[in-house]
Image (tube, rainbow, N blue to C red):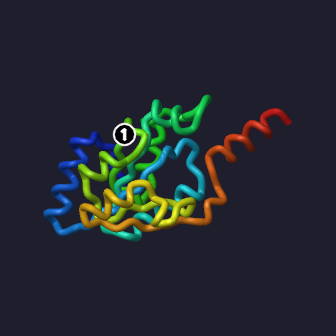
Amino acid sequence: MTGAVLTEAELVERVRADRAAGLTLAFANGCFDVLHVGHVRYLAGSAAEADRLIVALNDDDSVRVLKGPGRPIQTALDRAELVAALRMVDYVVVFPDLTVERLLTVLEPEIHAKGTDYTVETVPERDIVRAYGGRTVIVGDNKEHSSRDVIARIRARATE
């Protein structure tokens, strides 16, 4: 089974149904522009924290703001489909904001998972998560992988 790419309204309904069934929710987010093993490890670690994993994926405009010129490499819909195809992912939602604060407030997942480039104390949304009774966790590998590095290696090899 693969995950579903949902609108925000559809996701809110799924979250409601999952909660009614007694399931817990983990929430991970990112651009996921060029999928790599670091992403897989981050998402696997996130999924291990709850019954369902929601992945919030930045839309194309927010990726351009966050990552700079030439990004994203792939469209939001393509990135969402790739992430949803990973077996540990239950739901993917594309969002337009530069941060996930609004989505966290709307969904109130029990777990907010961030990668190892953060500590619990440095996660910008930690106060929002704490305020509704959620928990912030750090998961994944030691941030030895990045889309930026993969893109640079591809470009370097293309000019060899």
- Compared to residue 76, the image places residue 48 above or below, namely below
* Amino acid at circle 1: Phe
Query: Going 31% across and 52% down the picture, which residue do you hit?
Result: 104
- Compared to residue 51, the image places residue 103 above or below, namely above
Q: Name the residue that disc number 1 marks.
A: 95
- Compared to residue 105, the image places residue 143 above or below, namely below
- Which image quadrant is residue 94 in? top left
**Coordinates of residue 49 in the picture (x, y in percent):** 38, 70
Q: Is residue 90 left or right of residue 107?
A: right
**Coordinates of residue 112 in the picture (x, y in percent):** 37, 61
Query: Going 26% across and 66% down the picture, which residue do you hit?
Result: 133
**Coordinates of residue 125 in the picture (x, y in percent):** 38, 55
The N terminus sits in image quarter:
bottom left
What is the secondary structure assignment of the residue under circle 1? Answer: strand
Query: Going 34% across and 44% down the picture, which residue do you hit?
Result: 93
Q: Is residue 106 left or right of residue 126?
A: left
Query: Going 27% across and 42% down the picture, which residue do you hit?
Result: 8
